[in-house]
Amino acid sequence: MQHARIIGTGSYVPDNIMTNDDLAEIVDTSDEWISSRTGIKERRISKGESTSEMAYYAALKAIENANISAMDLDLIICATITPDSFMPSVACMVQERLGAKKAAAFDLSAACTGMIYAMVTSAMFIENGVYQKILVIGAETLSKVLNWNDRSTCVLFGDGAGAVVMSVSQSSRGGMIAHHLFSDGEKQSYLTLPSITLKNPYVQPETTDVPYILMKGQEVFKYAVRSIADNIKLLLSKAKMEKEDIQYIITHQANFRIIEHAAKISDISLDKFYVNLERYGNTSAASIGIALDEMNRKEIISAGDKIILVGFGGGMTSGAILMEWA
């Protein structure tokens, strides 16, 4: 059976940097308070870039890095919880701007695990011979769904996009080795983002939900730590590998304390965990793609390296991929 591998990466973040000190001017917080609790020092905040625009720029870089053209793409999947509109999808907007006329396109919603869900979905299309080349994007404009008076949430998030091009592996080396997706709807109240309230001739609501991210911080923290550790253990078992066989782990970049605790209970050196959240904050579906692109362009990862990508997010959702870098 053929398998899927990554042949190109790309990312985009707005130029506008909001530091912790900048935040302290609009909400009751401080650099020390944010840094000590999250590890975040700054984040990128859109000054007008839409989700589809950031997705497009990340896609351009991934396509260039893959050394292909947009016309080579068979499918575009965009993972996002902050689309420009309910329709058209971000993926269709990107398809039009790229000129990827042969590609089908759709959005996928799995919150911060979105990039993992989209990559596994793409791998299924490739492994079953349906498509050859697929563009996967994780893109978010979280700044438009934050309550900027709520320091428990507004200090955490940033805007950006990450992308990968996935293709059929042409060799026995390189590509996905194992993957896993998981959802726990019983914990859906931990992290929510309301949509439009039902209002029609038969229903007149007394109140209207405000479309802001709401989070039960302690519950999310515990879920995140446990899901990272459980997913790593499960993938190693599926692949019949040991912790020592893994060179790098890229988790969803939400909170340094989460990564630190997950590394400890997994008995894996923190040095194996790539962390860039101090510069970008939590970019939801974009975070793993941004981190992977940084590692690729800095030549931190080499052919043959075994890498685990692991995400967790609202739903609650989680998932992970173990791959060999080609």
Image: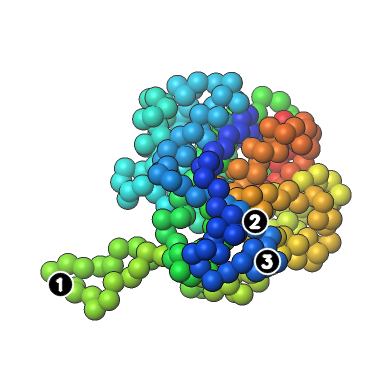
Q: Nearer the viewer, mark 1 or mark 3?
A: 3
Q: Which residue is mark 1?
A: 202
In the rendered image, the quadrant that contains the N terminus is: top right
The residue positioned 68% from the left and 49% from the top of the image is 276
6 left or right of 244 in image: left
Q: Is residue 31 above or below residue 176?
A: below
Please indicate whether residue 193 sits to the left or right of residue 125 in the image: left
Mark 1 lies on a secondary structure that is loop
Nearer to us in this view, 131 or 140: 140
Residue at 49 percent across and 33 percent down: it is 57
- Crowd tier of the residue under label 2, counting other residues whose Cα lies within 10 Å: few below 14, some 14–19, many 20 or above: many
Crowd tier of the residue under label 3, counting other residues whose Cα lies within 10 Å: few below 14, some 14–19, many 20 or above: few
Front in this rendered view, residue 271 or 134: 271
Of the numbered discs 1 and 3, the one sitting upstream in the chain is 3
Foreground residue among 167 and 255: 255
Q: Earlier in the sequence, mark 1 or mark 2?
A: 2
Q: Which mark is residue 32?
A: 3
The amino acid on which the numbered mark 2 sits, given as a three-letter code, is: Lys
Question: Distance of mark 3 from mark 2, alpha carbons?
Answer: 9 Å
Disc 1 marks which amino acid? Tyr
Q: Are marks 1 and 3 in contact (CB under 8 Å)?
A: no
Q: Is residue 198 visible?
A: yes
Image colouring: rainbow
Return the x and y of residue 90 as percentages of the image width and height. Answer: 39, 42
Reading the image, the residue beneath label 2 is 41
Pointer 1 local density, CA inside 10 Å: few below 14, some 14–19, many at least 20: few
- On screen, residue 117 versus residue 84, left or right, reads right
Quadrant in which residue 5 is drawn: top right
Residue 238 in sight: no
